[in-house]
Image: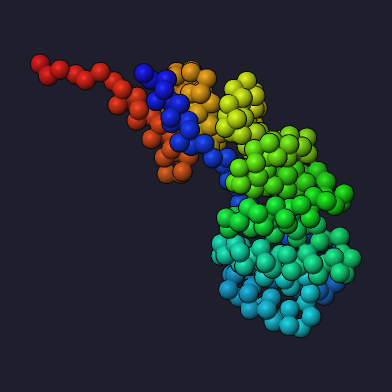
Amino acid sequence: MMLSFLLLAAQATGHVPARTRAPAPAATPAAPASPDEARFNRCVDLATGDPATAEREAGTWRMQGGGFLARQCLGMAYATELRWSAAAAEFEAAANAAEIARDSRAVNYWAQAGNAWLAGGEPARARSALNAALASPTLIGLPRGEAELDRARAAVAVGENASARADIDRALVDAADDPLAWLLSATLARRMHDVPRAQHDIAETLRRAGDDASAQLEAGNIAALAGDEARAKAAWTRAAQLRPDSDAGRAAMAALRQFDASAPARTAP
């Protein structure tokens, strides 16, 4: 029966979508910048364009007493190279140094560390860093919402869906315009078999990012769980058209192949 096959396809893509973001530098004072801030800005430019050179610059600067700014730059260079564990360790070192210096940027560094640990596949360490970030009342608005989403992803990774739901619900307040927040919420609702919530949240996702292949893939998964074969097929087709070479596009094409497999065999004339 087609419905059961559709449900298997939905379960096969049951993970909450991941997001890794290039760590943004913590807020810096308005111009004129101090010599350290100017050096930091130059180092950040290198970190995103020439990370190997940035590593050397940040390492030298750290030995010269560059403190948390040098460590953050080094962490960003490692992140550009996708060396997530090394990046996370530097961001944590920056956070600790900033706390000792009573610098408000510590909270940003803890959030960056959490994101990097998560990207490196260490959700328990990610949660610890994100707990430190979210404990601060100075983390507000969209940055707080992003940290809540990261902690939710970490919770899902260790099988704590209820904790993830609480964090995502908070993120939907702090980052209400972020389509990823709605997508993560819809995906988690599907995992928890809350079809009405999943349908509502994927509609909010599509309203903000209807041309995103991951959103269309999830729309198809949710439609499949609800038994709406036509909507599932339409959404998966759209995902495959939008980004055929992406993970979402390939997953959508795999889901669509079931329709060919279930077609009645034709008898040769």
**Is 219 rendered above or below residue 148?**
above
Where, by quadrant of the figure, is residue 96 drawn?
A: bottom right
Residue at point 57%, 55% (across, down) = 121
* Quarter of the image with the C terminus in it: top left
Question: In screen coordinates, is 20 left or right of 244?
Answer: right
**Is 147 rendered above or below residue 69?**
above
**Is 135 rendered above or below residue 160?**
below
Q: Please tell me which residue lies in front, 111 or 216.
A: 111
Q: Please tell me which residue lies in front, 159 or 122.
A: 159
* Residue 135 seen in render: yes
Residue at point 69%, 59% (across, down) = 113
* Residue 49 seen in render: no
Residue at point 64%, 38% (across, down) = 161
Identity of the residue furthest to the right in this view: 102
Residue at point 65%, 24% (across, down) = 197
- x, y (%) of residue 75? 67, 67
**Is 7 rendered above or below residue 153?**
above
Question: In screen coordinates, is 19 left or right of 92?
Answer: left
Where, by quadrant of the figure, is residue 196 drawn?
A: top right
Where, by quadrant of the figure, is residue 55 drawn?
A: bottom right
Q: Please tell me which residue lies in front, 78 or 131.
A: 131
Number of labelled discs? 0
